[in-house]
Amino acid sequence: MRKYFGTDGIRGRANGVITPELALKVGQAAGLVFQRGDHRHRVVIGKDTRLSGYMIETALVAGFTSVGMDVLLLGPVPTPAVAMLTRSMRADIGVMISASHNPYEDNGIKLFGPDGFKLNDAIEREIEALIDAELNRRLSASGDLGRAKRIESVHARYVEFAKRTLPRQVTLDGLRVVVDCANGAAYRVAPETLWELGAEVIAIGTEPDGFNINRDVGSTAPSALVEKVRERRADIGIALDGDADRVLIVDEKGHVVDGDQLMAAVARSWKEDERLTQPGIVATVMSNLGLERFLGGIGLGLARTAVGDRYVLEHMREHGYNLGGEQSGHIIMSDYTTTGDGLVAALQLLGVVQRQGRPVSEVCHCFEPLPQILKNVRYRSGEPLRQDSVVTAIEQARERLGAGGRLVIRPSGTEPVIRVMAEGDDRGLVAEVVDEVVDAVARAAA
């Protein structure tokens, strides 16, 4: 277990876990790890719209400049924009201040290498060791301190990048699109991109105040988008999360389309166009078994990884896939991006819709999902999954599900929660199995 890093950077309660002191140390540690060579080193820092972003940004600037790195401040931008600009601006490291889909009270620090990819476990462990080390003797001399400045036109750069992922002949003319920006990092760039591509845009979740990020809006609360799509009789609804690295779709009937269906639709289209670099896609253990069966039916495979988009991406890079993602809406299209990008994924789907000339409900309904139930068990300390009673309950549950079902038990990487997920053809059996395992875990956790 790592002390600071979870499945997606460092995350926790702002001014509780994510303190100015920790942010300062992260800046110093990461800055030292990525100082390679004699050139003037630089870091780009973006953030979402949380109130605590000001505090964390300032502390990170102090940390990076104290070890001699120049800082380029991007302001509120999506996480994938930070990854893209890290490469584009020839930075040595990129930082995104965000807790993604969490409420405003939380915040986090995500790090990208100079190639725009999230850091691997080995580098994160190296940074962790430095966070807890005495660094006073490694700080820069007075004349070697870094400088910080705010970069203008960042939004325009990302809008242009997103638009260029579609062929020039593809426009969104004639489409009425509702986009929900979760009062988060994409509140400017997502509506602008869709409008410049020709869509009629109705935007919600575009009035951030520091407190309302993800509150009753965005990909984790799609009911507001569903209502607006039905009210305005839109062709599609697009829901991003707080840092815009994930997306959910709502079709013209008001039905929610998750990441599994989105990946299926794009995979089928890319297979027909011979755009897939491997005969399949990459997803996590949480993706529905219905997706796996659908892909098998069209001659494609499904490689599964641990939960976390960086594990999906690592598998994609290692084995040459160019499409992967998570059921939650982290969709990675490595022809364009180095991380999940909700806006780019939505644009690619819109390109498929426009080319096929069919409604979103038809394009995105590729398979009937198997009954899948997920429940969370919160615990305070210890390792309840190691208890004999829990091990036995899990073994019995797997036997009951048999070959036609799946059981996935995993600790969350961002909070003290154990997630219990099961799926199969028989919903009643799936519900019983989940409840039995949850009860066993809850007793052990108590």
Image (cartoon, helix red, strand yellow):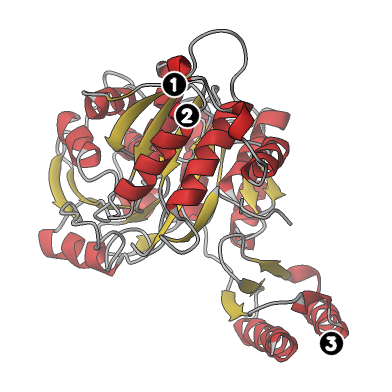
The dot on residue 145 is 1
- Residue type beneath disc 2: Ser
Which mark is in front, 3 or 2? 2
The dot on residue 389 is 3
Q: Earlier in the sequence, mark 3 or mark 2?
A: 2
* Residue count near mark 1 (Cα–Cα under 10 Å), binned few <14, some 14–19, many ≥20: some
User: Would you say the residues marked 1 and 3 are in contact, meaning their CB atoms lie under 8 Å apart?
Assistant: no
User: Would you say the residues marked 3 and 2 are in contact, meaning their CB atoms lie under 8 Å apart?
Assistant: no
Say which residue appears at 33% left-offset and 67% top-offset: 221
Say which residue appears at 55% left-offset and 49% top-offset: 8
Residue on which disc 2 sits: 66
Secondary structure state at the residue bearing disc 2: helix
* Residue count near mark 2 (Cα–Cα under 10 Å), binned few <14, some 14–19, many ≥20: many
Rendered image quadrant of residue 392 = bottom right
Label 1 – label 2 distance at C-alpha: 6 Å
282 lies left or right of 251? right
Say which residue appears at 66% left-offset and 39% top-offset: 130
Rendered image quadrant of residue 446 = bottom right
Secondary structure state at the residue bearing disc 1: loop
* Residue count near mark 3 (Cα–Cα under 10 Å), binned few <14, some 14–19, many ≥20: some
Label 3 – label 2 distance at C-alpha: 51 Å
Give 79 or 164, whichever is nearer the viewer: 79
Residue that lies at the very extreme toward the top in this rendered image: 38
Give coordinates of residue 228: x percent, y percent: 17, 62
Q: Earlier in the sequence, mark 1 or mark 3?
A: 1
Secondary structure state at the residue bearing disc 3: helix
Placement of the N terminus among the 4 image quadrants = bottom right
Label 1 – label 3 distance at C-alpha: 56 Å
